[in-house]
Amino acid sequence: MLTTTRLHDDIDELIPGLLADRRYLHENPELGCEEFVTSAFVIDRLRALGVEDIRTEINVTGVTGLIHGTGTNGGDRVVLVRADMDALPIHEQNDVEYRSQIDGRMHACGHDAHTAILLALARTLTDRRDQFAGTVKLLFQPSEERPPGGAKAMIEAGVLEDPHVDACFALHMAQNHPLGTIVAKEGPLLAASDRFSIEIMGKGGHAAHPHICVDSVVVGAHVIAGLQSIVSRNVDPIEPAVITVGSLQAGHASNVIPDSAQLLGTVRTLNPDTQTLIEKRIGEVANGICAAMGATATYVFSPGVPATVNDPRAVAIIREAATQVVGAENVISPNSQMGGEDFSFFIIERPGAMFMVGSNNPEKGLVWSHHHPRFDIDEESLGIGLETMALTVMTYLDRGL
Ligand SMILES: [Zn+2]
Ligand SMILES: [Zn+2]
């Protein structure tokens, strides 16, 4: 059985390397399914550590590898730990020595930290194979940010088998929580994120002769207003839901009534019943309003990522681990957030959970949110994330859920 003090001391020694890896990755950001430099860096590291059965080019740039424990306690479980590797099409505005070297590309969500932490976890576990039984499957995933996300294709490529994975864990940096906190939350952590489009067909003509036209702009305005009644009048008031129309495109001139208008939007929900209700109601509202006004609607609902719903047994292990690292008072369970994460696909297939690592520090000016050009984390969160994940994985392998 592992001793927490020794693990903590060992992890302290790994911090300079972990920091250097995170900074190297931060300087070399790559977009989804284009993580070639990142993936090569990961593969080199895993080989040097003696990680076994390294498989590459899964969904273009994805990588997996195995670490077999030689300990005698515990069972023969297989636990998967996932890190996402992709950056965003954002131009970094931070003036730091490890600033992005590529214009218009930036690690503005912390996936550089996730990848570096998983590499450091690989080192921690290969150094102490005799202290656990079972197998750790390391998974480096491409394209978390780019629809449809990189997780699903990796699962379809078979990463949950050979060997059969019993449980999955992941972590995410959290700029909305202070350094020194860990979010361990049962049930819904993040929302389902779906997209929709509505194409409204009216009848165009001269702006001065609306009576012989069907004005797609006016119809579109009524549809947008009508959609706002779905959350307020159809969804159960205690169920979180968001419908946002983020784009309305119609016409090019002040004196022309355009034939058509296109609306694009997103839906965020935590509960699959609410998701189904909203999918249905958007179509009914759009079709009903269009019919009443003499137009027609073509409605397409595109499912994105499901809600990230943590298994309570997996969260119990995380909470226990996090308590040893940051103290019980710093293990928090805030409200769900309406952002989405495609780690959800893993924990639909297998029990598991994602935890969040607080990385915000106003004293160092590290207050900018994810996806902002000035996003940056307090790097002290790296060691906290690593130690919590190492304890989580080893506790799971020892006891199971
Ligand atoms: Zn993100
Ligand atoms: Zn992210």
Image (cartoon, rainbow, N blue to C red):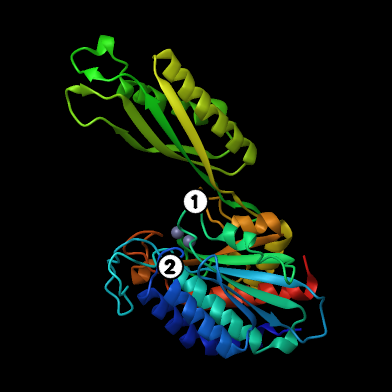
Percent of width and height locating residue 13: 53, 90
For disc 2, the marked residue is: 34
Q: Which disc is residue 170 wearing?
A: none
Q: Which disc is residue 339 wearing?
A: 1
- The total number of labels drawn is 2
Residue at horizontal 31 percent and vertical 18 percent from the top:
203
Crowding at label 1, few (<14), some or many (≥20) Cα neighbours within 10 Å?
Answer: some
Instruction: Classify mark 1 as within 8 Å of ligand 1 or not, answering yes or no.
Output: yes
Q: Which secondary structure lies at badge 2?
A: loop
The foreground one among 243 and 195 is 195
Image quarter of the C terminus: bottom right
210 to the left or right of 110:
left
Residue at horizontal 74 percent and vertical 89 percent from the top:
130
Nearest to the eye among marks 2 and 1: give it.
2
297 to the left or right of 277:
left
Inspect the image, locate mark 1, and give the three-letter code of the amino acid beneath it.
Gly
Res 79 seen here? yes
Percent of width and height locating residue 169: 64, 66
Q: Report the Cα–Cα distance between label 2 and label 1.
A: 23 Å
The foreground one among 156 and 395 is 156
Q: Height in image: 112 above or below 254?
A: below
Residue 362, located in which quarter of the rendered image? bottom left
Residue at horizontal 65 percent and vertical 87 percent from the top:
126
Residue at horizontal 38 percent and vertical 71 percent from the top:
29
Percent of width and height locating residue 349: 69, 57
